[in-house]
Structures are given as C-alpha cells and as structure tokens.
Image: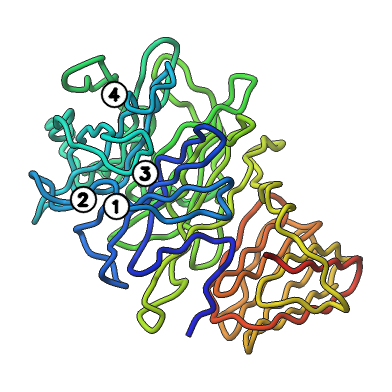
Amino acid sequence: MTIRPKLHFTARSGWINDPHGITVRDGRYHAFFQYVPDSTTWRADCRWGHSIGPDLLTMSERPVAIGPGEGDDGIWTGSLWPDPQGDPLGARIWYTSVRQPEIGIGAVREARPDTADWDRWSKGDVVLPAPPPELGVTAFRDPFVYRDGEDLFALLGAALPDGRAAALRYRIPAAGPWEYLGILAARSVRETEPVWMGALWECPQLVPLGDSRYALITSVWEDDVLHYAGCGIGAYADGVFSPEHWQRLTWGDTHYAPSAFRDSEDRWCLLFWMRDVGGSDDGWAGAHSVPYLIEKGSDGIRLIMHPDLQEHRRAASSGMATAHADIEWMPTAPGSTLNALAGDTTIEVVAGQGSTIISVGKTPPVVLPGSGGVRVLIDGGAVEVSVGGLVFGAAIRGGQVTVTGDGDLRVWSLD
C-alpha cells in the first residue's frame, strides 16, 4: 500500500490527472482536475473534479463540478475565467468536450456556475466545434484562456499532419463561436536540439515574464506517450510567438500537464499532475505536485517550490522525520552525496560537475543539467526534487524517512 501524501492533493478514491482552472477567490484556492471517481485507471469519460483550500497544499475535495452527458462523452482539460466584476456566478469555464470514437480531436464547450461556491455548473453552447478543416490536424484539445489588451484569447494544442506540434490561437467574443486567428507557434517533431518537443503540445500556455519576454509552456506528447513538460522562451507580438530558446522543465516519470495560474500574491506559478502515485491497491491513483513559482532566469525559466510550504514545516531531530519530510541540502563539492531512506526505498542525490544525479530505488539514475542547492520533498508516496530551477519527480510506497549527507543538511517534518 502507498502512504497517502499530506501536501500533494489526491482524490478520496479513483483516478485524477490534469489540474486546471486554478483560481484564487476570497482568500481561498479553487482547483479543478480531470477525474474518474470509480476507477484507478484512466478512462475517456473524465469529469471535472473540484477542490478548495487556503493554499494548494491543504485542499478539500468537493462534489464533481461537471460530468459527461448532454452530448459530452468526456470532460477534459480547459480553463476557468472569473468575472471581472467579482461576481462568482459570472465566471465561465471552457473545457474540452470529447465524443467517442474520435476522442483525440475535441470541441470546446462553455459552462457557467449554478452556485456561488462553484460546486455545480451548467453546460452551455459548443463555442468551437472543430479545428480549422484546412489544417488537417490529427489531435486538438486543451483551451488555455488569456487576456491580451481588452480582449480574451485562447490557445489550443494541435498536432499537424506534417509532424509539427502547434498552438492555435483564437479570439473569444462576448457571445457566439470563437474566431480562429492562426498558428501562434509550431515546432517539428524532427527537431531535437536543444530539446525535443514532441508531435503534439498538450496544455499550451503563454506566461508573461516581463521585459517583453514570454514562456510558452507545453506538455510533450507523441503516439500516446506522455513525456515531460518543456517550454519556449521568446517574444510575443501581433499574435505570433517567436521562440529564441527551448528548455526542458521536468525529469523523472511523474510530472506532466502543468497548469499555469496566479497565486494569492499575483505571482505566476505552475501545478503539475504527478503520474503513478498510488494505484489499484490503494483505491486512488494520481496526485498533484506542490505549486512552483515561475522565475525568469538568464536564458529560460526556473521553477521554485512555493513559499507556502514553509508554513507546513515542523522540527525534526537527528535527521529523522515521519513519512513526510522537507530536506534542504547544499553539497560541499562534486561527489557530495545525500542519502534518504523512505520506508524501503532509497533516494540518492549526488552533486556532479554542473549537474546533479538522482537515483530512486532500482530505477536508472537521472542526470539533471543543474547544480547547487537541492530541495527534496518526500511526502508519503510522492517525491519531488528541485535543483537549479529544474524539477524531478518519482512515485514510491513511502515510509519513515532517514536522511544523511555531506555538507549543509537541514530536515523538517511536514504536517
């Protein structure tokens, strides 16, 4: 059995994946997510689950917000846009509606809240029934809504028949169907340097970094294999994103489908789905990561574990903690090693020369191209490591944590 995380959201039962629609309202976070409540494996008939809490580390599950039916075979990833006047009943959700058997190409449908607590939503019109026919796309989904000037726009992920992954751009009118404006950005599956970005961009999101720079954050997909999260850094003008640099954001087998949002202090952040945490023996499967601040680096972005984590630290003595531990480690030199034992799973972090090597259990070591201070979060069945603004994740069974290491080492228990 897997020890359930304390600070990584999991559903009471069933399967969860992509977080989305993360919104701060009246001092509380609302987070929605793809959800199959009666299965620990993915099915196409996902719902929008809903959770709320004072921070994204202590979320309480609410009733299903939107479910299949009324022309939808599945309710997939999308966006929530709050009413600019603050009326909770004026908010709108735009989600990916899928129908069997062509679930790879979705439509976009609107929903509006029935209740001020956002527990129940009613479906409205299909505002985007299909992608532009002239593009011949082979996959199409995941509306991300953003404001540019006075207007609302949306990006959708697409796979083009010539092997390019693309983000398509739309204008959202006050009422009626969305207007297709063109391709925001695209990249061939055959391009591999400095990082490969796949054949489809799932969950494409455009985040401003300041100084006229933007990050186009995507999830890298090919042939139904979910790889990792990556992004392009560049300029955005006149409806076109011009990348100057591409980078990978996550390593390991868990982190995928990040959702960009503004936190309670209006800072841009990301929250990931963590795959493989939990499973059929546990009655629940999937977790959400801790939130990460997005910081602009010298040639890309850095992801920093959110400072809200500090509020959940409690003193641990002699390097010992419970099954939930927060570890900060500064290696003294290349070759310095941090060792943690969580139950019967070994976690080893070795400082390299400009890199960091991470090993979890019997899986092959992973090399991150970053170095310096290391943050290791062991939360029951979920492990996250942050170093140099890059993120590694893994799923374990969990257990009592013991930590040793060279250099400056600090350990806290988590509540």
First along the sequence among labels 2 and 3: 2
**Does 230 sit left or right of 357 as displayed?**
left
Disc 4, disc 1: CB below 8 Å? no
Q: Which disc number belongs to residue 64?
A: 1
SS under mark 1: strand
Sequence-wise first label, 3 or 1: 1
In front here: 277 or 228? 277
Viewer-side residue, 87 vs 307: 87
Q: Please name the amino acid that badge 2 sits on.
A: Gly
Gap in angstroms between the C-alphas marked 2 and 3: 35 Å
Quarter of the rendering containing residue 374 = bottom right
Tell me which amino acid carries mark 1.
Answer: Val
Q: Quarter-wise, where is residue 218 in the image?
A: top left
User: Disc 4 or disc 2, which is closer to the eye?
Assistant: 2
Q: Are marks 1 and 2 in contact (CB under 8 Å)?
A: yes
Give the residue pinned by disc 4: 170
Q: State the SS at label 4.
A: strand
Numbered badge on residue 188? 3
Q: Secondary structure at mark 2?
A: loop
